[in-house]
């Protein structure tokens, strides 16, 4: 074998060794899709821009939460939003609040002359004959409802869902441990079928003298973290027929309706449609400062509330009231109840200290008087 042949053979052996060293093991799956930032921008540029579904508060492809206290008009606004979107595409409105007759009363004149909705708007309510989740093979009613929502999406092809309200999907929306699975499920539906979802939620009792914040949403931390956008409704203290809309979270656009610029609406029923319509100004929707719609608390009214709180608190052993019960009774937040209780305790303690003189000082004074 020549020197050249020996070198070639040696090189082949080395190459074989190197190849053996770099043979990869089993390919492992990864939850991450890793690309350069520039590649992400390039890929995103080929996708359509999200279009607003309602004003600038809810966009295509978002899980959005609308929250407010009871009887503020969440469902009225949600049906109005569904009506507008149904003029362009199919919408499923999952109504867990109203019966069919209650729905008819809102969108008719004395149960006649019904409002004519676009056939793209589909309404779903729970069938009382199909609520046996165990018979259907599910561990809970919530799981049965979640599966049924997915089935409705598959059968109708609708890409827009409105869920009224969140408490029917999970038992304890206000608890963080239940909020996380709930939002994950909505996210999974959104990503799997390319959906846009508006979910309605209740708020606990809040102090009507204070602005609305994300903390007023039950289970706020988890729910707010996992939704794409959120907006809230409040009742105007100036006029009980007026409502104001305030954005709480937005990812697809700049926040427009904030504490200094809330949008004003009115609820009315001129004919056969219970409407939630914006109060129009010269250049669009009328907007004002939020504080203009908040309840103004006078010194006298605050003292009355504090006195009522302390009366209920001091009698809690007989009435079994908790701080949350007191908050509900006084129409204020639990935080305000605790603040008033702690403040009153401090005042009582300070007064006790002022009137209790140390024994040594008193003895000294008595000795001085005897002299």
Image (spheres, grey):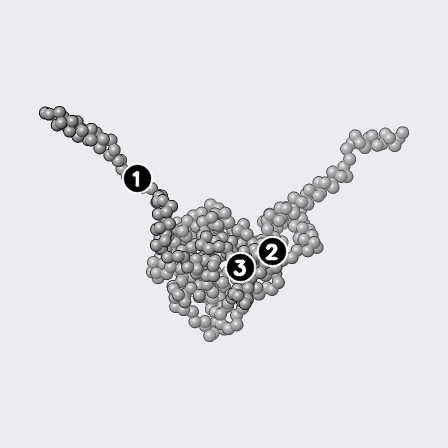
Quarter residue 50 falls in: bottom left
Residue 141 appears in the picture as rendered: no
Is 288 positioned to the left or the right of 133 in the image? right
Residue drawn at (68%, 55%) of the image:
298
Left or right: where 321 falls relative to 132: right
In front: 217, or 261?
A: 261
User: Picture coordinates of residue 133 (x, y %)?
Assistant: 39, 54
- Can you tell which mark lies on residue 86? none
**Image quarter in which the N terminus is found:** top left
Specify which label sits upstream in the sequence, 2 or 3: 2
Mark 2 or mark 3: which is in front?
3
Q: Which residue is mark 2?
A: 208
Picture coordinates of residue 37, whole percent (x, y): 38, 46
| Label 3: how many Cα within 10 Å (few below 14, some 14–19, many 20+) | many
Residue pictured at 35% horizontal, 57% vertical: 151
Please state which of residues 91 and 5 is positioned toward the viewer in this rendering: 5
Question: Which residue bears the numbered disc 3?
Answer: 245
Q: Quadrant of the C terminus?
A: top right
Q: In this picture, is 278 found above or below 333? A: below
Q: List the residue tagged with mark 1.
A: 28
119 vs 100, nearest the viewer: 119
Q: CA distance from mark 3 to mark 1?
A: 48 Å
């Amino acid at each position: 074998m020549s020197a050249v042949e020996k070198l070639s053979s040696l090189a082949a052996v080395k190459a074989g060794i190197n190849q053996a060293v770099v043979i990869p093991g089993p390919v492992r799956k990864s939850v991450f899709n890793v690309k350069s930032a520039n590649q992400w921008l390039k890929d995103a540029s080929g996708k359509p821009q999200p279009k607003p579904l309602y004003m600038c508060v809810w966009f295509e492809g978002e899980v959005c939460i609308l929250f407010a206290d009871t009887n503020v008009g969440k469902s009225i606004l949600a049906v109005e939003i569904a009506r507008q979107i149904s003029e362009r595409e199919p919408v499923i409105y999952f109504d867990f609040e109203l019966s069919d007759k209650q729905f008819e009363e809102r969108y008719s004149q004395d149960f006649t002359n019904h409002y004519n909705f676009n056939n793209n708007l589909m309404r779903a309510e729970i069938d009382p004959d199909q609520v046996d989740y165990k018979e259907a093979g599910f561990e809970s009613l919530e799981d049965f409802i979640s599966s049924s929502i997915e089935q409705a999406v598959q059968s109708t092809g609708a890409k827009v869902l409105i869920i009224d309200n969140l408490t029917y999907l999970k038992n304890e929306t206000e608890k963080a441990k239940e909020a996380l699975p709930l939002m994950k499920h909505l996210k999974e539906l959104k990503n799997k079928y390319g959906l846009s979802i508006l979910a309605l939620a209740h708020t606990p009792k809040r102090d009507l003298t204070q602005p609305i914040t994300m903390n007023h949403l039950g289970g706020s931390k988890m729910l707010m973290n996992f939704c794409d956008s959120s907006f809230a409704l409040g009742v105007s203290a100036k006029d009980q027929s007026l409502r104001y809309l305030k954005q709480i979270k937005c990812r697809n656009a700049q926040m427009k309706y904030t504490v200094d610029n809330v949008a004003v609406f009115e609820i009315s029923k001129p004919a056969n449609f219970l409407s939630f319509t914006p109060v129009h100004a010269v250049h669009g929707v009328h907007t004002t400062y939020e504080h203009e719609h908040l309840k103004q608390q006078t010194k006298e009214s605050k003292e009355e509330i504090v006195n009522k709180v302390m009366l209920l608190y001091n009698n809690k052993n007989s009435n079994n009231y908790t701080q949350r019960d007191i908050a509900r009774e006084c129409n204020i937040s639990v935080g305000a109840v605790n603040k008033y209780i702690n403040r009153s305790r401090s005042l009582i303690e300070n007064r006790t200290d002022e009137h209790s003189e140390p024994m040594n000082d008193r003895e000294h004074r008595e000795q001085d008087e005897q002299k």
